[in-house]
Image (spheres, rainbow, N blue to C red):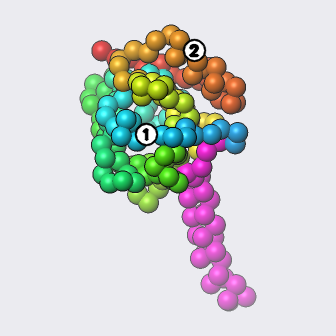
Amino acid sequence: MKNLKKLILPVSLGVVALFFFSSCAVGIPKGVTAVQDFQSEKYLGKWYEMARFDFRFEKNLDNVTAEYTKKDVNSFKVVNKGHDYVKNEWKESVGEARFVNSPNEGRLKVSFFKPIWAGYNVIEIDEDYKYALIAGNNLDYLWILSREKTIPDSYKQKYLEKAKSLGFDTSKLIWVKHD
């Protein structure tokens, strides 16, 4: 009985840690595929967030941007910025994105709080790398990005239709305002 009590705490902590880290998976939603022949050099630079599913870490943010710069052949530096319109202050998060498999596949993992990584999957992108549809590791994470502060309606509709066909509830999207 004494030995059993000594095992309960470490085993319990292990189970909690396993649950916590598995919830931060770097996977891709079932039935969703990442862009193949991904050209990471063309993806670098500044992106404007057009739409997103709302999360605690982006709550009340408008004017949201993400800027990607190359760190090495397998990773990017990521700087996310946004204006909290409730607190009237700018927020910034600096992180890192790494390729899950090959730099030629749009499957990445991103971390702003190491050692916790999350899936970041480029699932649709135009040939000029001006507009992108991004999925997380499950159907609860979705973003539409643009190189400009607006997105043509044709791309908006195309990405919404694709997301719906993959099982995303696009009615939950928050459309981001840009000044």
Amino acid at circle 2 = Gln
- Nearer to me, 34 or 117: 34
- Residue 174 horizontal/vertical position (percent): 50, 22
Q: Is residue 161 above or below residue 38?
A: above
Residue 2 appears at what percent x and percent y?
68, 89
| Magenta-tinted stretch | 1-29
Identified at 53% across, 11% down, the residue is: 154
Secondary structure mainly formed by the magenta segment: helix
The alpha-carbon separation of the residues under discs 1 and 2 comes to 24 Å
72 relative to 67, above or below: below
The answer to whether residue 27 is magenta is yes
Q: Which residue carries the number 2 mark?
A: 157
Q: Is residue 46 above or below residue 17?
A: above
Q: Is residue 120 visible?
A: no
Q: Secondary structure at mark 1?
A: loop
Q: Secondary structure at mark 2?
A: helix
